[in-house]
Image: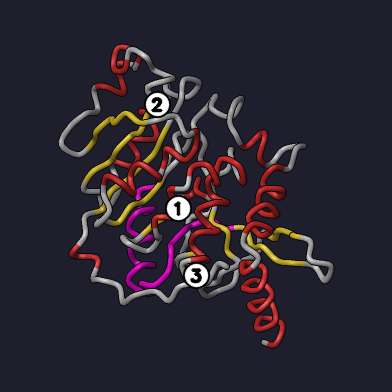
């Protein structure tokens, strides 16, 4: 039996550090420094940016990394080593390393606009009980219970907003419980799409997702980074994202109840 939890009162953001977290792999490590530079140059700079890499993929660690990336290391940017849990390296180790701080996740293939962090924090101040994002897909259920996606989002926080991590996602501290670390389960339900698992855990913890005001929806990809990537599997012909959402809804039936209830409220409007 999976019950939705009631969120505790949030703490003011001034009490927390801002941690930017991302991951990369062998096929993208040559250009990851370009994305990181845009994160380091935000109008509201993170207190620390951490790049999590898998020992398995870089057996010689720093000796396998490009000079441009190593040159960025400072008191505001670190490279840390972790187990290879694929895209989950973006958030899972950061939640363990920085449990009391605000974590904002990024991808390694985007030139981020300078206001991404600032606007996420503005959204957090306005809706402190929510996960904050710039981009989301709306998840709904047909009359027969099938999952469908829409690019439209509500103008207020909603459970149906499945955030897409590529745009930047803000996770306040202590908003997700330890079930998020269940590697055996997330690798079974959604092995190549961490967003689906993180969204499911968001709902199970009683949190809605807020698409921030003046959200930055457009993506400026770093050249030559789109030839490879999990999005080819997740959103290509295999349509794995859809099947992964079905997986988590089947594993946690209360999620269907949440989505149906929210749909009824929206239709009543």
Please give the name of the residue rendered at 54% of the width and 51% of the height, measured from the top-left corner. 197
Sequence-first disc among 2 and 1? 2
Q: Say left or right for 120 vs 3.
A: left
Q: Residue furthest bottom?
A: 268
Residue occupied by mark 2: 54
Q: Say left or right for 216 vs 239.
A: left
Where on the picture, by quarter, is residue 191? Answer: top right
Circle 2 crowding by C-alpha within 10 Å: few under 14, some 14–19, many from 20: many
Q: CA distance from mark 2 to mark 1?
A: 19 Å
Label at residue 180: 1
Examine the structure image and report whether residue 37 is included in the region drawn in magenta.
Answer: no
How far across and how far down the image is residue 72, in percent? 24, 28
Please give the name of the residue rendered at 40% of the width and 47% of the height, measured from the top-left corner. 105
Q: Nearer the viewer, residue 128 or 207?
A: 207
Please state, as top left, top right, bottom left or bottom right, where the C terminus lies in the image. bottom right
Q: Nearer the viewer, residue 63 or 226?
A: 63
What range is drawn magenta here? 113-136
Please give the name of the residue rendered at 42% of the width and 23% of the height, measured from the top-left corner. 29
> Mark 2, mark 3: which one is toward the viewer?
2
Please give the name of the residue rendered at 67% of the width and 52% of the height, measured from the top-left corner. 247
How far across and how far down the image is residue 254, in percent? 62, 69
Please state, as top left, top right, bottom left or bottom right, where the N terminus lies in the image. bottom right
Q: Are marks 1 and 3 in contact (CB under 8 Å)?
A: no
Where on the picture, by quarter, is residue 2? Answer: bottom right
């Amino acid at each position: 039996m999976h019950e939705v939890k009631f969120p505790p009162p949030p703490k003011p953001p001034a009490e927390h550090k801002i941690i930017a977290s991302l991951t990369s792999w062998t096929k993208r490590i040559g250009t990851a420094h370009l994305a990181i530079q845009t994160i380091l140059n935000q109008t509201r700079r993170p207190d620390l940016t951490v790049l999590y890499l898998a020992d398995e993929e870089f057996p010689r660690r720093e000796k396998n990394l490009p000079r441009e990336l190593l040159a960025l290391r400072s008191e505001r940017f670190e490279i840390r080593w972790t187990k290879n849990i694929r895209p989950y390296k973006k958030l899972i180790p950061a939640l363990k390393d920085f449990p009391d701080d605000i974590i904002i996740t990024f991808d390694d293939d985007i030139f981020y606009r300078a206001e991404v962090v600032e606007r996420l924090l503005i959204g957090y101040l306005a809706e402190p009980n929510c996960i904050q994002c710039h981009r989301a897909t709306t998840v709904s259920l047909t009359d027969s219970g099938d999952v469908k996606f829409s690019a439209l989002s509500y103008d207020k926080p909603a459970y149906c907003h499945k955030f897409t991590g590529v745009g930047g996602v803000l996770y306040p501290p202590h908003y997700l419980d330890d079930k998020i670390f269940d590697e055996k389960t997330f690798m079974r339900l959604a092995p190549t799409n961490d967003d689906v698992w993180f969204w499911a855990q968001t709902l199970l913890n009683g949190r809605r997702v807020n698409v921030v005001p003046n959200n930055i929806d457009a993506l400026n990809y770093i050249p030559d980074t789109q030839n490879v990537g999990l999005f080819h599997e997740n959103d290509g012909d295999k349509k794995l994202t859809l099947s992964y959402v079905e997986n988590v809804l089947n594993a946690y039936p209360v999620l269907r109840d949440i989505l149906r209830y929210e749909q009824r409220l929206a239709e009543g409007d």
